[in-house]
Image (cartoon, rainbow, N blue to C red):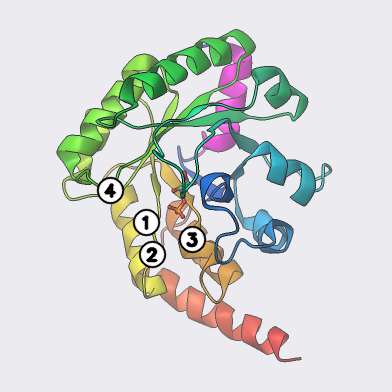
């Protein structure tokens, strides 16, 4: 691995504790204006001080993040499908590596759909992106997307993560599941977890993050459970205290409550 690639990777997963908080705001690339992310700039701005990196598309980066901001960018470069189209797995590379370099991306993200109709295409997409990433010193994050018909169990997620790592991904994002430690064990590169759909209570999302880290995850790439919370800033601070601090879910939740009281106070002024 060359110096540039290692340097970029160290911005995503801190070498101090081998962990990272990635804020995911790329959902519009196939979902359109998702709840909580209708106006990306408004959602993103207050959360930036608490994220180690920001995952998004070039369109939202250009329009909704000031270029003087000091946050490593994880650029989603796969897409070309939508929630109303035929098949979400039929993704292609939709942003070039030259463009990613112009945008000063620290990492490139792409989804693979193991077990889907377009499995082969998305895995070949990953292999091409890894070759380009290696050429220019940019790490690749493989996102293990799960179709509706797939079980989110350790057998399936372990398979998808391992294949991503075998093809050369430098980080893999997946979902937390029972026996998650088996997924991590079988994947020779850092595994981070997505939050998934907004859980009814913040404590549940904090528990999810805690359990994932306890079982070997290198961090979170969390979106909806942060910005669909009524108190997104308090939520990302609480998630951060689990990832980089020593908080257990209850302590982080207490922190969330205290911080949300302050947010409520500010809102009501
Ligand atoms: C969308 C993604 C998201 O970045 C990922 O799912 C994380 O967000 P969330 O925590 O809301 O699940 O890859 O395709």
For marks 3 and 4 on the same chain, the one whose residue lies earlier in the sequence = 4
- Looking at the rendering, the stretch of residues picked out in magenta corresponds to 2-16
Q: Does any atom of ligand 1 lie closer than 8 Å to the CB of label 3?
A: yes
Residue 255 in the image: state x and y as whole percent: 49, 74
CB atoms of marks 4 and 2 within 8 Å: no
For marks 3 and 2 on the same chain, the one whose residue lies earlier in the sequence = 2
Query: SS for tag 3?
Result: helix
CB atoms of marks 2 and 1 within 8 Å: yes
- The numbered dot on residue 177 is none
Residue 150 in the image: state x and y as whole percent: 22, 43
Q: For residue 59, which quarter of the picture?
A: top right
Residue 7 colored in magenta in the image: yes
In three-dimensional space, the C-alpha distance between marks 3 and 4, rounded to whole angstroms, equals 18 Å
- The numbered dot on residue 148 is 4
Residue 69 in the image: state x and y as whole percent: 78, 46
Compared with 190, 31 (above or below) is below
- The numbered dot on residue 209 is 1
Q: Does any atom of ligand 1 lie closer than 8 Å to the CB of label 1?
A: no
The residue at which mark 2 appears reads as 206
In three-dimensional space, the C-alpha distance between marks 1 and 4, rounded to whole angstroms, equals 23 Å
In three-dimensional space, the C-alpha distance between marks 4 and 2, rounded to whole angstroms, equals 25 Å
The residue at the point 67 percent across, 89 percent down is 265
Residue 179 at least partly seen: yes
């Amino acid at each position: 691995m060359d110096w540039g690639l290692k340097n970029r990777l160290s911005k995503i997963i801190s070498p101090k504790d081998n962990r990272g908080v990635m804020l995911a705001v790329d959902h519009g690339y196939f979902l359109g204006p998702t709840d909580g992310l209708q106006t990306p700039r408004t959602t993103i701005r207050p959360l930036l001080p608490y994220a180690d990196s920001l995952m998004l598309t070039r369109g939202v980066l250009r329009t909704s993040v000031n270029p003087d901001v000091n946050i490593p960018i994880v650029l989603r470069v796969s897409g070309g499908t939508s929630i109303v189209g035929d098949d979400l797995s039929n993704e292609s590379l939709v942003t070039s590596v030259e463009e990613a370099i112009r945008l000063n991306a620290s990492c490139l993200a792409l989804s693979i759909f193991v077990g889907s109709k377009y499995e082969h295409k998305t895995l070949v997409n990953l292999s091409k992106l890894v070759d380009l990433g290696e050429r220019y010193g940019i790490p690749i994050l493989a996102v293990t997307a799960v179709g509706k018909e797939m079980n989110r169990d350790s057998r399936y997620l372990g398979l998808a993560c391992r294949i991503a790592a075998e093809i050369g991904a430098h980080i893999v994002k997946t979902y937390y599941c029972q026996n998650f430690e088996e997924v991590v064990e079988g994947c020779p590169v850092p595994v981070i977890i997505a939050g998934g759909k907004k859980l009814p209570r913040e404590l549940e999302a904090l528990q999810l993050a805690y359990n994932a880290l306890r079982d070997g995850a290198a961090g979170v790439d969390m979106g909806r459970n942060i910005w669909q919370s009524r108190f997104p800033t308090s939520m990302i601070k609480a998630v951060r205290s689990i990832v980089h601090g020593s908080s257990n879910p209850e302590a982080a939740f207490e922190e969330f409550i205290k911080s949300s009281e302050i947010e409520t106070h500010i809102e009501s002024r």
